[in-house]
Amino acid sequence: MSNDKQFVKEITPQGEDFSRWYIDVIKKADLMSYSPVRGCIVFKPDGYEIWENIQRELDSRFKETGHRNAYFPLFIPESFFQKEKEHVEGFNPELPWVTEAGGEKLEERLAIRPTSETMIGHMYSEWINSYRDLPLLINQWANVVRWEKRTQPFLRTSEFLWQEGHTAHEDEQDARRETMQMLEVYRDFAENFLAIPVIVGQKTPSEKFAGAVDTYSIEAMMKDGKAVQAGTSHYLGTNFAVAFDIKFLDRENQHQFAHTTSWGVSTRLIGALIMVHGDDRGLALPPKVAPTQVVMIPIGPPKTREQVISRVDELYAQLKQAGVRVKVDDRADQSPGWKFNEYEMRGVPIRVELGPRDMENGQVVLVSRVTGEKKVVAQANFVEEVQNLLAEIHQQMYDKAKTFRDEHFVAVDTLDEFKTFLEGKRGFALAGWCGSNACESQVKEETGATSRNIPFQPEVTKSTCLVCGDAAKHTVVFGRSY
Amino acid sequence: MSNDKQFVKEITPQGEDFSRWYIDVIKKADLMSYSPVRGCIVFKPDGYEIWENIQRELDSRFKETGHRNAYFPLFIPESFFQKEKEHVEGFNPELPWVTEAGGEKLEERLAIRPTSETMIGHMYSEWINSYRDLPLLINQWANVVRWEKRTQPFLRTSEFLWQEGHTAHEDEQDARRETMQMLEVYRDFAENFLAIPVIVGQKTPSEKFAGAVDTYSIEAMMKDGKAVQAGTSHYLGTNFAVAFDIKFLDRENQHQFAHTTSWGVSTRLIGALIMVHGDDRGLALPPKVAPTQVVMIPIGPPKTREQVISRVDELYAQLKQAGVRVKVDDRADQSPGWKFNEYEMRGVPIRVELGPRDMENGQVVLVSRVTGEKKVVAQANFVEEVQNLLAEIHQQMYDKAKTFRDEHFVAVDTLDEFKTFLEGKRGFALAGWCGSNACESQVKEETGATSRNIPFQPEVTKSTCLVCGDAAKHTVVFGRSY
């Protein structure tokens, strides 16, 4: 499985060409391969395992908040898309269509799902009859397809993997509570599991989900200053309930339309992880999501090799026992130096070195991927020291990403000011916005930046629109994005 | 989520109409809904959770045997199917085709994967260069589509969920070892996790996977005497390696084609579970796969209610702590009797009853779903008693299914004998077979039964072909199947 890697001798430095750096890293770290189908990638084991860790963690958080998983069909009849006007306009250009199956032309074309509000809306209309059936709290782990013109591995691919939560509620208040709860689940997950600081806020009308009343997002800054929308949560009002007739008898025995929500994150989180934490040496994976948290490398001359490996194995067993994801690389045909580089490139948070002198002194060396610092610790405290360092690394990675974002985040008063900022430096700008589509479009045309969201807790608030100078309705985060 | 259920007042007895019984049970237990897309079902939470438990267990068994997960594209270019002749003949009639996407007609049609040997073969040819890259041991959890004419929930649906393992090896010996290893993983999983006894053997040439050299299967008997193929493992020889050019430099620096395998189980296992263990009262789920293993129901008059519930909660916490999947149903608006029926119908292995008299005596009542027996045990030994009973129930369910199979399994010498057997009773027959397609076809035409497999350990061996009377090459299991 090393073929793809052979094309990447060295990783292009981030400062030279960030896009090349990104592709070099994901190739060299063996996370993916391009597939023969346009815009579709293969998630190789080292890439897919990151997704498995994301899945496991999010799934348990969804279940803790009362959701259950289900699975709905991949195919969506064409007529379903016609039922919600904004939805069809938003997704129609990106749909692949199945027109033939089983040797026959289909009477009605079937879309491959780009998202499942329509299919799930249809099913919910069958399942929901009474307020007793509410709230209905379901999540689906699935593949979805959006036929994108420009694709980029993990960040934007024609087929991708995601989860989509779909819930139905008795009233607006409960649906909005759910929308906010899931947004907070995402924020907490991004910051405390992926070590990615995010800006939490509401999308402007032009950037909201096709068919939603309100869309909320968490936005992360990559090391090239561009944004990745890392998760969204939508309050759909009764739009899909009306379109699909999701009605119930309320507590007063009156028919009501349900209020629905949807929320999702996708495999683009893998791309965000790489671009937030990676550096010129390669990947850097936050400890909680890293498939391998610790790699142990025995060092020293052949004559002490066996003895050293035997001690490494003992320490390995202790870590394993404590639930740490640890590997030993005791291959004799690769030098320690080669291994150090290899696991740094692969982003393993901690390297453990043990040689004959460490044996004598009852110590062991821990090296942090993120700071490069060596720490000599007593073997007697090995497990505790590793666990502490893992927690420390998480915090350091979060802080580092936060500092980077702060350094690339300005408040501006005018469009010109924003343009000047973007010429010198990449990043986000906070600015006042009057609320008109025209002003928002002008920012996009002149800078390539879009409104990321209207943050709940902006660092500063601005009182005039950066474009027209009228009174600002909102303070908005603008940035170029993936 | 109770709407579907309302159409099922009573479960049709198995003896009256087995197919009706099956549909009644899965509707009433809320496992699935029909979808608006032909042949596709919705896996509702109570059905999907069974699949999640199957996934978790199998996934850990695959990882223990050295496999890693990856994800390959849903779409397969039409030209890929042309490369392996038997494969295209086997799957072409069942493929759905994407012909348009993103508003344009595609230059090459894309099939929705029915299985991924072709796509994975293509990728492996890029990834594998040297014997050092082998064995390559990958599994994929995915949705697949086969446009079936006749569908049946879980057992045969147009879209279904499955896992497909795909491995590549240096030589035939290692690939065959893998094929057998995974077959054994499936056997052990079926018998020791799902409590389903299976017949392990090799498929006849007419029944093997399209493109395989040899196909092996585990076959289970449903309560109507029909077979479900519960898992398959294929030795593919170099067929796909030649078609997709999966070549490597061997230890003597010579180019060789890799030997590949594939193996899979699907959501049809849910159907098998229901049809092997269910009865006229409804579902019966083996403890290891049951989403809820124990339901606790407080009983007695209102005046002791609070006290009883508080004790139930304590015992609940103990079970939960011990890792048992347990629920309490303390709703006041449903009678204990209604609850007893409800959880029996849903197949929960153990019901726990606790009332005021049990409180006084420091005891608690355990009721087994499978035997209906009540067991009064000391509260002091509660957790241990529950764990023992769960283990006992697993064994009882396995034994019961095995006894049923034995009682519906005969050895026959002639086709007439088999026909007579099928008139009186449903089930399988062991019979000699000369090895000719003609004789195998004749059995199918005259009885509707197909060869299930050539068992590795037949109860008896037969020396003459049941059709032509010539010397038997194999002793074969014949049966009607889903």
Image (cartoon, coloured by chain):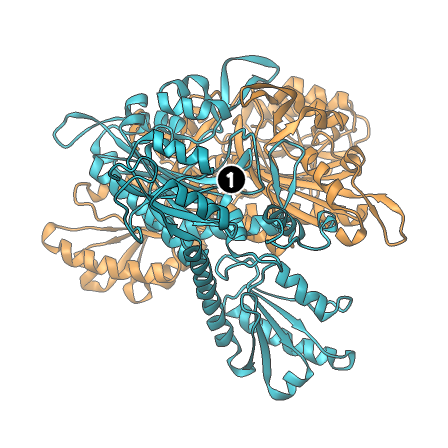
Chain colours: A cyan, B orange
Seen in the image, is A409 located left or right of residue A31? left
Which residue appears at 37% of the width and 30% of the height? B27
Q: Judge by depth and name the residue closer to the eye, A301 or A17.
A: A17
Which residue appears at 67% of the width and 77% of the height? A310
Chain of the residue on which disc 1 is drawn: A
Q: Judge by depth and name the residue closer to the eye, A132 or B286.
A: A132
Q: Does residue B8 appear anywhere in the picture?
A: no
Mark 1 neighbour class, 10 Å CA radius: few under 14, some 14 to 19, many 20 or more: some
Q: Is residue B20 positioned above or below B266 on the image?
A: above
Q: Residue furthest left?
A: B303
Residue A473 sits in which quadrant?
top left
Q: Judge by depth and name the residue closer to the eye, B411 or B398.
A: B398
* Rendering coords of residue A111 (x, y %): 49, 23
Seen in the image, is B124 located left or right of residue A173? right
Q: Identify residue type, mark 1.
A: Leu
Which residue appears at 90% of the width and 53% of the height? B252
Which residue appears at 73% of the width and 45% of the height? B127
Q: Is residue A373 positioned above or below A401 on the image?
A: below
Q: Secondary structure at mark 1?
A: strand
Which image quarter is the N terminus of chain B in?
A: top left
Seen in the image, is A321 located left or right of residue B354? right
Residue B415 sits in which quadrant?
top right
* Rendering coords of residue B303 (x, y %): 9, 53
* Rendering coords of residue B442 (x, y %): 71, 19
Q: Judge by depth and name the residue closer to the eye, B227 or B475.
A: B227
* Rendering coords of residue B333 (x, y %): 17, 41
User: Which residue position is annotated with label 1?
Assistant: A161
Instruction: Give the number of callouts.
Output: 1
Which image quarter is the C terminus of chain B in?
A: top right
Q: Is residue A297 positioned above or below B466 on the image?
A: below
Q: Does residue A358 appear anywhere in the picture?
A: yes
